[in-house]
Image: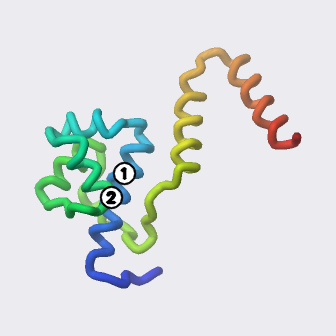
Amino acid sequence: MPRLEHDNDVDVAISHKIHNERVLQGMSRKQLSAELGITIQQLGKYESGQNNVSASRLLIIANALNKSILWFYDNPAQTKKSTAHTRLCLEATRNFRKIKNRKHQEAINSMIKSLIEG
């Protein structure tokens, strides 16, 4: 298992987990910050690691994201912030799942395959 190099690596990992889980759940910063009762800017500071998250605030964030507070401390050395590519893949998956027509889903899948092959 990778080792933590600095004392604040856990804080950085927590900030990345907040960001990644928000994106994974399809929540905007505006939505999550409203649920937390904080500004969009403050949430951005938490997600970027600019500001550390207090224990009480982390509990509130965990509840808003439907996660155990312990989840934030699981494998901190292996946690990295999601990339633009990862976010795009998640968004495409969320949008694809919203398509109810099976034939439309198959058509989109065929188009993707043709782009890969072409």
Direction from residue 112 to residue 2 in the image, left or right: left
Give the quadrant of residue 27.
top left
Residue shown at 70% from the left, 18% from the top: 104
Q: Which three-letter amino acid code belongs to the residue tagged 1?
A: His
From what the image shows, is residue 25 above or below residue 6? Answer: above
Mark 2 or mark 1: which is in front? 2
Residue 58 in the image, given as x and y percentages of width and height: 19, 55
Q: Name the residue nearer the viewer: 61 or 33.
A: 33
Residue 19 numbered tag = 1
Residue 48 numbered tag = 2
Residue shown at 32% from the left, 82% from the top: 6
Give the quadrant of residue 108.
top right
Q: Which three-letter amino acid code belongs to the residue tagged 2?
A: Ser
- Classify mark 2: residues with Cα within 10 Å, few (<14), some (14-19) or many (20+): some
Q: Residue furthest right?
A: 118
Q: Quadrant of the C terminus?
A: top right
Number of residue marks: 2
Give the quadrant of residue 92.
top right
Residue shown at 73% from the left, 17% from the top: 103
From what the image shows, is residue 66 above or below residue 114? Answer: below
From what the image shows, is residue 111 above or below residue 73? Answer: above
Residue 39 in the image, given as x and y percentages of width and height: 19, 41
Residue 46 in the image, given as x and y percentages of width and height: 25, 55
Direction from residue 7 to residue 113 in the image, left or right: right
Q: Name the residue nearer the viewer: 81 or 3.
A: 81
Direction from residue 84 to residue 53 in the image, left or right: left
Do callouts 2 and 1 mark residues in contact (Cβ within 8 Å)? Answer: yes
- Classify mark 1: residues with Cα within 10 Å, few (<14), some (14-19) or many (20+): many
Residue at disc 1, secondary structure: helix
